[in-house]
Amino acid sequence: MEVKVEENDLKTAGAELLTGDGRRGIRIRGWEIETLKHSILKSSTAQEWEQKLQTSHLPEMVFGENSLILKHVKSGTKLYFNAFDALCGWKQEALPPVEVPAAAKWKFRSKPSQQVILDYDYTFTTPYCGSGTIEIDKDKDASVAEEQCNLKWEDCEEKIDVVALASKEPILFYDEVILYEDELADNGVSLLTVKVLRVDGVLIRLRDTRMHCIFGGENPVILREMCWRESTFEALSMNGHPVDSSVYSDPSAISMKLPVVMHKTQKLTISA
């Protein structure tokens, strides 16, 4: 999806675009929002990741240097999404493998003569909903020190105002960043844009994370909604929905057809 941004819209909103060095982004109301896109992970780096994750399995295409970064400049609060942290979530959660009849014939390619045991979640489903740090400028003349911290997300009953988001406001910035992808040997697709997973003929699993912040005020509040929806194709068929996997390529179109497994809303108050 390509979105054309009008210069007048940027000026009206008090925003400016960020460009250069492979970055795309926008600076607006005390926030810097940017995306970074690079090539697929090199084999040497992939081996390092396997050692760190204590696994011999990674998705076919890992975009290890891709990221989405949202930074509140005054407080130094930075929210970001990357592939390594997402795979850490996959490894820690360790869901059981999805049962696909033909899976044993294709998933391991190293020694076809040996019996294959699928003992890991080869769909690479992850509960990952973002990472957080605070950058502390200890000395304006010195380099910025970035410290990993546990941001104080609190469970809440508030919801993101989807109706307000649907209003006809100009889009000032849009981008989509792929963190990893695996074709599952033509049995479906596993795609992490922190958005969607599908295994054709067996299962549709949608894990969606959305963040929303209203600009303005000294202490911005970010709402984060996490929702896990899942259904088998058999259950969809019993409820009168089609079983053709091509119908379910758009996560927005299928979300309401899938029952909710987990839903949680949290908020983060930023102290500037």
Image (cartoon, rainbow, N blue to C red):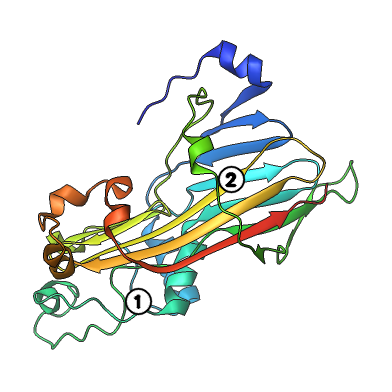
Residue 100 on image: x %, y %: 14, 75
Choose mark 2 or mark 1, whichever is in front: 2
Q: Which mark is residue 267?
A: none
| Picture residue at 32% right of the left edge, 65% below the top | 259
Direction from residue 260 to residue 202 in the image, left or right: left
The residue nearer to you, when weighing 230 against 164, is 164
Q: Which mark is residue 56?
A: 1
The residue nearer to you, when weighing 104 against 167, is 167
Picture quarter containing residue 93?
bottom left
Look at the picture and state if 22 lies above or below 204. above
Direction from residue 35 to residue 117 in the image, left or right: left
Residue 60 on image: x %, y %: 28, 60
Direction from residue 135 to residue 10 in the image, left or right: left
Q: Is residue 61 visible?
A: no
- The residue pinned by badge 2 equals 212
Q: How many marks?
A: 2
**Distance from the alpha carbon under mark 2 to that under mark 1:** 36 Å
Question: Of marks 2 and 1, which one's residue comes earlier in the chain?
Answer: 1
Residue 214 on image: x %, y %: 66, 39
Which residue type does callout 2 highlight?
Answer: His
Regarding mark 2 in the picture, which secondary structure is present there?
strand
